[in-house]
Image (spheres, rainbow, N blue to C red):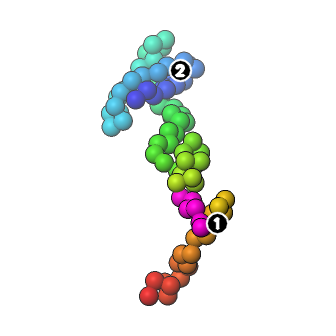
Amino acid sequence: MIYDYRCECGNVQEEIHGMTENPVVTCSKCSQTMQRIVTGGTGVVFKGGGWPSADARFKNSMTKKSAHKGQKAKDHHKPVTTLGDLQ
C-alpha cells in the first residue's frame, strides 16, 4: 500500500509498506519523524451482476412472454413484509 506522510517542516512524501506495518518514517529534508496522513485511498470497484452495465441484460432475462403477443407476464409472487407472511 502507498501511504502519505507529513513532516512538521511541511514536507510530504509517499512511502510503500504493508497495512499491518507501522514503520518510523524520517523526513528526507530535515530527518525528523513524520506522521502518516489519513487519505481517501483508492476508489471503489463494483464487480458482478446487478450494476448499471448489467441491468438491461438482467431485466430482459427476467421478463416472461405471455400468451398475448407483445405483453409481458406479471409477477404473481406475494412479497414478504412481516414474519407472519412466512408461516
Q: What is the quadrant of residue 23 in the picture?
A: top left
Q: Give the residues drawn in magenta, as a range.
A: 62-68
| Residue at left offset 58%, top offset 70% | 75
User: In 3D space, how far apart are the residues under numbered discs 2 and 1 (Cα atoms)?
Assistant: 68 Å
| Nearer-the-camera pick, 26 or 22 | 22
| Disc marking residue 12 | 2
**Which residue type does callout 2 highlight?**
Val
Crowding near pointer 1: few (<14 within 10 Å), some, many (20+)?
Answer: few
Confirm whether residue 79 shows in the render.
no
Q: What residue is pinned by disc 1?
A: 68
**Amino acid type indicated by mark 1:** His
Q: Could you say where residue 35 lies in the image, as x and y percent from the top left?
A: 47, 30
- At 52% from the left and 25% from the top, the residue drawn is 6
Residue 50 in view in this figure: yes
Quadrant (top left, top right, bottom left, bottom right) of the N terminus: top left
The percent coordinates of residue 8 (x first, y second) are 54, 24
Which callout, 2 or 1, points at the residue further toward the start of the chain? Answer: 2
Q: Would you identify the image quadrant in which residue 9 lies?
A: top right
32 or 21: which is nearer to us?
21
